[in-house]
Amino acid sequence: MYFGNDQFRIINGNVLTTRSIKKDSIDLIVTSPPYNVDIEYNSNDDALSYADYLTFSKKWFTRCFRWLKSDGRFCLNIPLDKNKGGQQHVGADLTKLATAVGFQYHSTIVWNEGNISRRTAWGSWMRASAPYVIAPVELIVVLYKEQWKKISGSGQSDINREEFMEWTNGLWTFPGESKKRIGHPAPFPIELPRRCIKLFSYVGDTILDPFMGSGTTLVAAHLNKRRGIGIEVDESYCKLAKERVNEAASQLHLFEGEEELNGENNS
C-alpha cells in the first residue's frame, strides 16, 4: 500500500494481482479504465490488440465482481466506440463482457462531454464514399452484483431534489477535465464520480476506483463523506493522487470550520 488513513487508501499495485481488497467489501466502484487508444501513460501499455484488451477487461471485471458487496454497484465510464486501430463497438463489447462475468445490467448514462473536440469528417470529405461518424459522447454503464435495491450501509442519502431530478435523466452534460491542469494524460472531471457517488451510494460507504490515476474518484468520495480506495500501478500517479486528496481534505476541514464559526456567530 502506498498511503492510507481512516478515510482513504491508495494502493500502488496492479488490479489483476493486488491482495489489498477484501471480498464483499466495496459498496460502489466508479472507474474509467484505459481505453486502449495508445495514450502515453507512465506504466501502462495502452496499445494492446483488441482481443488482448477484451481479455484484460474480463480479468479485471472478475476481480471487481468479487470485491463488491451483494448489493454493490459498478459505474463504468467507457467510450461508446473507437476508430483508432479500426472501428470497434467498445461500449457494447465491454457491457457484454461484464454481464458474462456475472454483473447485472441496470442502465446506461450518456455523458455529453461539452468541451470535447473531435473531428467527425475523417474519411471522405463531403462525399458518400467513406465518411466516418464519431459521436462526441462517452458512456457510464451502471451495473450491480446480485440485487439492485441497496440494503447495506448507513441508509443516509445526501442528494437533493434538484440533483436527483437532473441526474436520473440519463443524459449528462458537463465538460471534461484538462490534462495539463491535473498532470495526468487522461483525467475525468470530478463531476462524474461526484454524481455517481451521491446517486448510487450512502454517506459512509466505501468507494473503489481500480484505475485511480490522478485520484479524482477519491477526492469526490472524501468531499462527499465516503471512504475511498484507489488502485494505481504507477507510483508517480499515486503521489499525485495523495497530494490531491490531502488538498481536498484541507479544504473540507476549512469549510467545516467556517460553518462552525458561522453557527456560533448566529447563536
Image: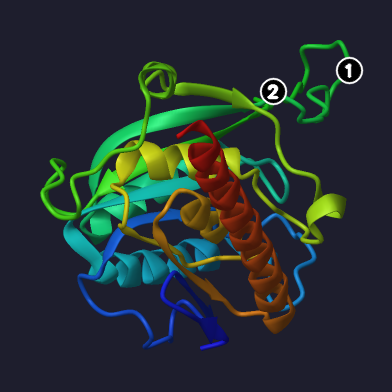
Q: How many labels were placed on the picture?
A: 2
Which is more toward the observer, 204 or 193? 204
| Residue 17 horizontal/vertical position (percent) | 43, 86
Q: Secondary structure at mark 2?
A: loop
Residue at 50%, 81% (x, y): give it.
Answer: 4
Residue under label 2 = 133
| Image coords of residue 144 (percent x, y) | 24, 49
In the picture shown, does residue 201 fall above or below 6?
above
Q: What kind of residue is marked 2?
A: Val
Q: Amino acid at mark 1?
A: Trp
Which of the numbered marks, if any, corresponds to residue 117?
Answer: none
The residue located at (70%, 54%) in the rendering is: 37
Decide which of tag 1 and tag 2 comes sooner along the chain: 1
**Which labelled disc corresponds to residue 125?**
1
Nearer the observer: mark 1 or 2; the answer is 2
Up-down relation of residue 158 to residue 30 (above or below)? above
Q: Is 251 situated left or right of 1 in this image?
A: right
* Cα distance between the residues tagged 1 and 2: 12 Å
Residue 90 appearing in the image: no
> Residue 18 appears in which quarter of the rendering?
bottom left
Q: Quadrant of residue 21?
A: bottom left
Count residues near mark 2 (Cα–Cα under 10 Å), then give few for <14, some for 14-19, many for 20+: few
Which quadrant of the figure contains the C terminus? top left
Front-most of 132 and 65?
A: 65
Residue 108 in the image: state x and y as whole percent: 39, 32
Are the residues at dot 1 and dot 2 in contact (C-beta closer than 8 Å)?
Answer: no
Judge the density around disc 1: few (<14), some (14-19), many (≥20) Cα neighbours within 10 Å. few
